[in-house]
Amino acid sequence: MLGRVEAAPISRRTIAMEPAPVTPADRGAERVSNVAIDFTAVKKSYGEKVVVDQLSFTVASGECFGLLGPNGAGKSTIARLILGMSSPEAGKITVLGEKVPARARLARRRIGVVPQADNLDLEFTVRENLLVFGRYFGMTAKDVEKITPSLLEFARLESKADARVTELSGGMKRRLTLARALINDPEILILDEPTTGLDPHARHLIWERLRALLSRGKTILLTTHFMEEAERLCDRLCVLEAGRKIAEGPPHTLIDEQIGCPVIEVYGGDPNELCALVKPLAQRTEISGETLFCYAPDPEQVLARLRGRTGLRVLQRPPNLEDVFLRLTGREMRD
Amino acid sequence: MWEQYAAALPANAWNWSAVWRRNYMAWRKAALASLLGNLAEPMSALFGLGFGLGLMIGQVDGISYIAFLAAGMVATSAMISATFETVYGAFARMHAQRTWDAILCTELTLGDVVLGELAWAATKAVLAGTGITIVAAALGYAAWPSIPYALPAIALTGVAFASLAMVVIALAPSYDYFVFYQTLFLTPMMYLCGAIFPVTQLPIALQRVAEALPLAHSIDLIRPAMLDRDASSVGLHVGVLCIYTIVAFVVSALLLRRRLMR
């Protein structure tokens, strides 16, 4: 992102939440394992179109794993496959030791989901939404009432407990969806583009809440097309294009390996002409739309060459995941 | 292999109740308006046709026309309530509101959701059918003690038509298609199945057709109950309605699985 936004000043309170009641079935399913989600050579297509192509990855317990890619890369399909809401044509999926989709219901008992589109019950209040959702996990009204205050506090919605969902802002709705996803005290959280469509303030608040969850040992699988989000939150990520994995690793390792030098973005002129001008001074250049990306170990030289030309907007910045994506695919991810 | 289809079936005998309770909670917020809406149409038909045509017709099957019509309106209103709750209410929850999407991320299976929706639609049918039965009884067109006998028949009618409507929403791309179901199936059925006039008035061929339709069996259960008469072939009528319910439930669950869990 070009403009940085100050993070909202929020104290990091630790929230003690009541653990969900442990049923005998849960105890039986408890196995010592560091692997939360495992995909092996998974394939899924709709008609002729291959949406997930021979995809393998492993998410370890307690880590934040990101699926990064543009719209249509297969991110949401992967989330659906994990939940058993879609069946793979080939390959093997294991979630929390359960085979998916065959035993997806048992896995879902220990998963919380924040879907891409809000699907809260609009006619209900905040409190009622939690109650209704808790019942889907076999909780009684009493069970839900007991944990509601801590969930509302976590979501910073204490003052909105009896407000209807239609009265909430976009950011509040997302936080309620997050609180709702925590009702069964899940081990894994699946977040499908959790901050898409939110303003920067609301987005930073969600990020801060997600980090609080990670510090409590939750495993997070996050899909996003938003590189700043992936860079800030993810321990490791998998970059996707058209259902295929094109890179995997910790964000900064990927950036260092693929780019490894400062970036100068130039726009406002003819990118092809500018490209010819600075090419000798750069390690690599890339044109995307009307913007010239110039990867230069010595940015001062490039800036000096461009100085004096009017009408140009020039921005020097450290490399980021967008550059990695651009390098690997030849096109931009932002849309 | 069959595990693939497990998702389309209820996971256990009680999960569906969470869906029913969600719908009940939402309904409670607008209960009065909803009740009025459900009762107004069959009531106006009952009084309009009953008093109006009743003057000209006099007696049918040895009773006043309005008493004959009352049972037909009870069965029809159960049919319509269950159908509309499914094609509009449940379809909205599946399609536009994405309520089902949220539920399918929890412990519940698609089969649990479908079962909960059927139970809820049947509840609305019971409310509408019972409402009219009570009005008919208060006006002396039905026997009070018969209400407990009519209730299970009304409930079964509700479940059967909710299941059939579930097949319709599993196939319909949008709301526009529901009108076909109503005009091509429900409305003709109302005329063929003895709701408004005795089936024996129809040509033999159409009488045979009526025997296969679910509403005819509902009416054959509800009318004798309301008029305090002995019902014949109760087993057959209940059996036909149960077959409609079970077959439609399984077909709808499989179709919905194909639609929603691609």
Image: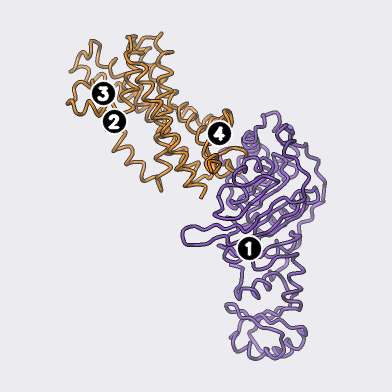
Chain colours: A purple, B orange
Q: Chain of mark 2?
A: B
Q: Which residue is mark 1?
A: A225
Q: Which circle's residue, 4 or 3, is located before the other in the chain?
A: 4
Number of marks in picture? 4
Mark 4 and mark 1 residues within 8 Å of each other at the beta carbon:
no
What secondary structure is marked by label 2?
helix
Q: Residue B93, position in %: x, y?
A: 50, 41
Q: Which residue is at 71% across, 31% downward?
A: A143
User: Label 4 vs label 3: CA separation?
Assistant: 35 Å
Vertical side of B96 occupied by A319: above or below: below
Q: Which residue is mark 4?
A: B19
Residues at discs 4 and 3 both on one chain: yes
Q: Chain of mark 3?
A: B
Q: Which residue is mark 3?
A: B196
Residues at discs 2 and 4 both on one chain: yes
Residues at discs 3 and 1 both on one chain: no
Q: Which residue is at 44% across, 36% downward?
A: B86
Residues at discs 4 and 1 both on one chain: no
Residue B189's disc number: 2
Q: Nearer the viewer, residue A238 or B40?
A: A238
Q: Residues within 10 Å of mark 3 (few under 14, many from 20)?
A: many
Q: Which residue is at 56% across, 53% downward?
A: A88
Q: Residues within 10 Å of mark 1 (few under 14, many from 20)?
A: many
What secondary structure is marked by label 1?
loop
Vertical side of A105 occupied by A71: above or below: below
Q: Place residue B76 in its image quadrant.
A: top left
